Image (cartoon, helix red, strand yellow):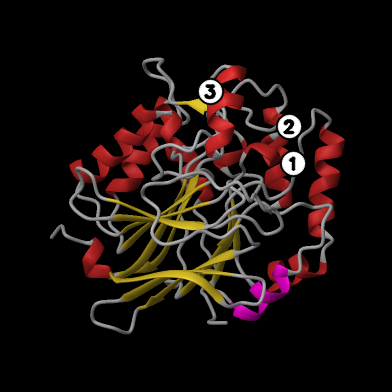
C-alpha cells in the first residue's frame, strides 16, 4: 500500500468558523476502494479480497450494519459485531477508512428525519468509526455530512459525503394496489417522486455547505452518496424521489463549472454503472457498489445503465494514474474473487471541460 501522509484534521478551526465539512490533508490516493450493505450477522469474506488490494482509502457508503431498531444498545452491539470480524479488523489496521450511514445504520428501513433516536444513533455511529470528540459531525443540528480533501496542487481528490437521512422529508408512496399490480411486476419499488414543493433529503443548511464544497478547486470531485443519484426512476429510494435536490445538484455543477465529478453509491443490493449528460457539459458517471453481503435479484430498470448489472456481492475500485500528463481513471466493480465484473475507463480531461 502506498504510504499516505497522516491526515491533518482542522477540527478546532472548523468549529470556530462553523464549517460544515471537515478538512484533511493527505497524499492524493491512487486506489480508492468502496462498498456498502454488509450484514453484521453474516460472514463477510469479501473483506479478505479487499485487503489484498492494499487500497489507499476505503469508503463505506452506508448500510454498513443492519441496525433496524429503536434500542440503542442493540444498535451499538451490532456495530461491535462488525468490528469483531477479522477481515474488518485487518482493513481498519491497514487502510484509512471514511464512512457515511444510510437507513439501516441510521436506524430503520427507509426512515428519514422523523427517526426518534437519531441523536443517539449519531454518537454510536461516530464512536465506532473513530470520529474525534471535537468533530462538528457530532454536534451539528442538521446531520453528519462531511468532506475530505486529499493531495495538493493538480493531484487532488475531494470526497464529498452528503447525509441523506437526517433531514430527509417524507417519501411519496404509491397505493398498495398499484405496487402489486404494476410496480412489482416491473421490478420497481413503492415510491414515486415527491410532489411537495421544497421537499428535500438534505435541507437548506446542508445545501449551502454543499455548494461551498463544490466551489473548492480539486482535480476530482468524488460524490460519495449513500443512495443512487443518476438513475431516473427505480421506485426505490434514490435522488430521483426528490427531483428538486437532484436538479439543484446538476445546476450547481454547471453554474460553478465544477470539473471532475465522479459519483459512487450503494444501497441497492445490486451493482451497475450509470451515465448521464442531459443539460450538462460533460457526462456524469456513477458506479453503484452493493452489497458486501446483500443481494437483490429483482433488479430495477435504469435507462442510464451502461452495460449489464450484477446481483452478486461486490466492491468498487476507483484507480487514478497520476503519472500520466492526462491522468487515466478507471472505475471497476469487482467480485469476491477480485476479478473485474464491469468497468469504465476515461481520462481526467474528458470530465474536465472548464478552464
Residue in view at x 27 percent, y 56 percent: 217
Q: Label 2: which residue?
A: 120
Label 1 vs label 3: CA separation? Answer: 26 Å
**Viewer-nearest of discs 3 and 2:** 3
Q: Label 3: which residue?
A: 171
Over which residues does the magenta segment extend?
46-54
Residue in view at x 80 percent, y 52 percent: 40
Image height check: is 310 above or below 52? Answer: above
Give yes or no for contact between labels 3 and 2 (Cβ–Cβ under 8 Å). no
Which numbered disc flags the more N-terminal residue, 1 or 3?
1
Q: Label 1: which residue?
A: 124
Q: Quadrant of residue 83?
A: bottom right
Q: Nearer the viewer, residue 7 or 253?
A: 253
Q: Which mark is residue 265?
A: none
Which numbered disc flags the more N-terminal residue, 3 or 2?
2
Label 3 vs label 2: CA separation? Answer: 23 Å
Q: Quadrant of residue 252?
A: top left
Amino acid at each position: 500500500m502506498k504510504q499516505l501522509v497522516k491526515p491533518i484534521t482542522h477540527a478546532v478551526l472548523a468549529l470556530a468558523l462553523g464549517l460544515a465539512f471537515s478538512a484533511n490533508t493527505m497524499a492524493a490516493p491512487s486506489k480508492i476502494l468502496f462498498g456498502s450493505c454488509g450484514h453484521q450477522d453474516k460472514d463477510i469474506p469479501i473483506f479478505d479480497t479487499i485487503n489484498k488490494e492494499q487500497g489507499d482509502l476505503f469508503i463505506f457508503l452506508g448500510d454498513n450494519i443492519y441496525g433496524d431498531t429503536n434500542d440503542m444498545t442493540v444498535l451499538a452491539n451490532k456495530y461491535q459485531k462488525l468490528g469483531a470480524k477479522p477481515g474488518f479488523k485487518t482493513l481498519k489496521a491497514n487502510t484509512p477508512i471514511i464512512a457515511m450511514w444510510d437507513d439501516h445504520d441510521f436506524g430503520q428501513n427507509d426512515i428519514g428525519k422523523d427517526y426518534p433516536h437519531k441523536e443517539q444513533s449519531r454518537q454510536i455511529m461516530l464512536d465506532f468509526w473513530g470520529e474525534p470528540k471535537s468533530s462538528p459531525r457530532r454536534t451539528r443540528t442538521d446531520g453528519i455530512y462531511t468532506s475530505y480533501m486529499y493531495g495538493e496542487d493538480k493531484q487532488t481528490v475531494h470526497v464529498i459525503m452528503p447525509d441523506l437521512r437526517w433531514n430527509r422529508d417524507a417519501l411519496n408512496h404509491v397505493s398498495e394496489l398499484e405496487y402489486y399490480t404494476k410496480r412489482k411486476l416491473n421490478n420497481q419499488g413503492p415510491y414515486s417522486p415527491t410532489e411537495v414543493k421544497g421537499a428535500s433529503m438534505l435541507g437548506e443548511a446542508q445545501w449551502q455547505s454543499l455548494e461551498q464544497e463544490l466551489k473548492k478547486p480539486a482535480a476530482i470531485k468524488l460524490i460519495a452518496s449513500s443512495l443512487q443519484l443518476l438513475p431516473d426512476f427505480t421506485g426505490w429510494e434514490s435522488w430521483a424521489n426528490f427531483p428538486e435536490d437532484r436538479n439543484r445538484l446538476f445546476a450547481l455543477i454547471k453554474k460553478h463549472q465544477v470539473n471532475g465529478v465522479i459519483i459512487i453509491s450503494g444501497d441497492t443490493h445490486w451493482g451497475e454503472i450509470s451515465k448521464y449528460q442531459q443539460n450538462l457539459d460533460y457526462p456524469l458517471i456513477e458506479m453503484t457498489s452493493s452489497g458486501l453481503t446483500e443481494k437483490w435479484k429483482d433488479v430495477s430498470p435504469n435507462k442510464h445503465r451502461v452495460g449489464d448489472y450484477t446481483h452478486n456481492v461486490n466492491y468498487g475500485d476507483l484507480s487514478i494514474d497520476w503519472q500520466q500528463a492526462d491522468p487515466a481513471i478507471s472505475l471497476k466493480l469487482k467480485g469476491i474473487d477480485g476479478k473485474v465484473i464491469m468497468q469504465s475507463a476515461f481520462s481526467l480531461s474528458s470530465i474536465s471541460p472548464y478552464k
